[in-house]
Amino acid sequence: MSNADKFLKASSEFPEEALGDHRVYEHPLVQRYATKEMSFVWSPAMKFSTWRKLWTALATAEQELGLEISDEQLDEMRSKIFDIDFEYAALKEAEFRHDVMGHVHAFGKVAPTAMPIIHLGATSCYVGDNTDLVQIREALKLLKRKLLQVLSTMKDFAMKYKDLPTLGFTHYQPAQLTTVGKRCTLWMQDLLIDLERVSREIDELPMRGVKGTTGTQASFLELFDGDHDKVKALNKRVCELMEFDRSISVSGQTYTRKIDYNVLTLLSGISQSAYKMCGDIRLLANLKEVEEPFAKSQIGSSAMAYKRNPMRSERVCSLARYVMGLPTAAANTHASQWFERTLDDSAIRRMVLPEAFLATDVVLNLLRNIADGLHVWPEVVKSHVMAELPFMSTEVILMECVKAGGDRQELHEAIRVYSMEAGAVVKGEGKPNDLLERIAKDSLFAPVHSKLDKLVDPVLFVGRAPQQVEEFIADDVDPILAANKDLLNVESVDGVNV
């Protein structure tokens, strides 16, 4: 038997006993990328302990408003919020074919005195939807902190390089000069807009509240013997206990899924900003002007040992692209909800909401890491500037010669001819731009021969870029960082693994 035949025989079947601990699919977003902080927000521990908090808040408010619920029952519920038997809940869910009732019974098992009043008057969406909103709020708070930290790190970079001239690009063709720091502020401005939206969403996010089966609060009206004021007070009090300023005004069984869409478009916006920034960095890395952090023993390519690939920026773009695609799922889910509710929103929301936050959180971790270690090669930047600046400086040279008594049309024609000849040398022969050398040899341009070097100083061609950086930081960035200085000092649990 040949070696090829032996290989085919050895690889034809997967042994039943082989690799037993690795035969189940693992989601790479969770296993490879997600941070501990955001994973906790969307964890079963967070979800189901919040269910118990909601049940306890409901019972507390119902007692305050006159229902016969004892202090002993509430004490028992409070003491068992974090005592969750997940195996028992799973058994009861399998029995009832209902996840909420599975956890009602799991709560009742450890809080037997309270069992008769757990979930009193509520529907499944009372715990399900309100918990989703709690998790969304906590996840947004985490993203807000990380956005602030990214902006703080980028601020230092922008200020450090606010005066360093660099080629601007339009259509990815050389254009008027800007500065490295000014370009950074363009990335920062996008993220600042995202931060403003995140802050607004945190402030304005409503709780679903206490609404009942189809949103009419009928079950609670029955519990309080038709007392509308008590039903309204119940809704308000539960929101207060869960630290929400308000609830959504009207609902069906669920809160409107348009809220999910709005949240996902916000996360998509952050991802767009990150993709734009890291796309630029990848292009600059190709020009060898800028490089992202690169570890001492990091390998850029398994085949090409010399390579320094912008792997972190590429990962940002990959994850950001995924998040940018998720709002469509939320839009379709909202649009397809029939009347007061259909359950075809359930499975997809279990995936897209956590995954959008998990991925966006990783993106922000990576952005801060990249910005903190972003390395600029000033001499490379300068060489690219000087390769194009002679063409850009011709208007200044022409004006100086005219002011010294030269003929504008004659000068313009000479510059045009020399520019075409210099361009042919650069493109046709691969040699450096020699336009200034040609001008320096022509007596027509004698008035500027002694100051050509000064006339083509890159600093003269960046406009107000340095001042714009200073003004943007002082007027737009610093006030927000100062208002949130406590968040800037909170260290993330997770680092970045390349």
Image (cartoon, helix red, strand yellow):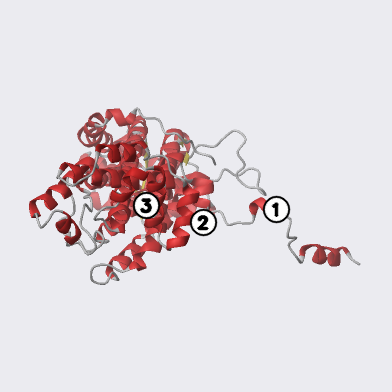
Of labels 1 and 2, earlier in sequence is 1
Of labels 3 and 2, earlier in sequence is 3
- The quadrant in which residue 153 appears is top left
Screen quadrant of the C terminus = top right
Residue 53: x and y in percent read 31, 43
Task: For residue 113, say whether it is visible.
Answer: yes
- Identity, as a three-letter code, of the amino acid under mark 1: Leu
State if disc 2 and disc 1 touch (CB < 8 Å): no
Depth order, front residue of 73/344: 73
State how far apart marks 3 and 2 are (Cα). Answer: 78 Å
State the residue position of label 1: 19
Comparing labels 3 and 2, the label whose residue is closer to the camera = 3
On screen, 452 above or below 255? above
State how far apart marks 3 and 1 are (Cα). Answer: 38 Å
Depth order, front residue of 358/218: 218
Identify the secondary structure beneath mark 2. Answer: helix
Screen quadrant of the N terminus = bottom right
Residue 387 badge: none
- The quadrant in which residue 438 appears is top left
State the residue position of label 2: 428
Q: Residue at x 60, y 56 (%)?
A: 24
Of labels 3 and 1, earlier in sequence is 1
Identify the secondary structure beneath mark 1. Answer: loop
State the residue position of label 3: 104
Depth order, front residue of 407/430: 430
- Identity, as a three-letter code, of the amino acid under mark 2: Gly
Q: Residue at x 66, y 48 (%)?
A: 302
Q: Residue at x 51, y 56 (%)?
A: 428
Comparing labels 3 and 1, the label whose residue is closer to the camera = 3
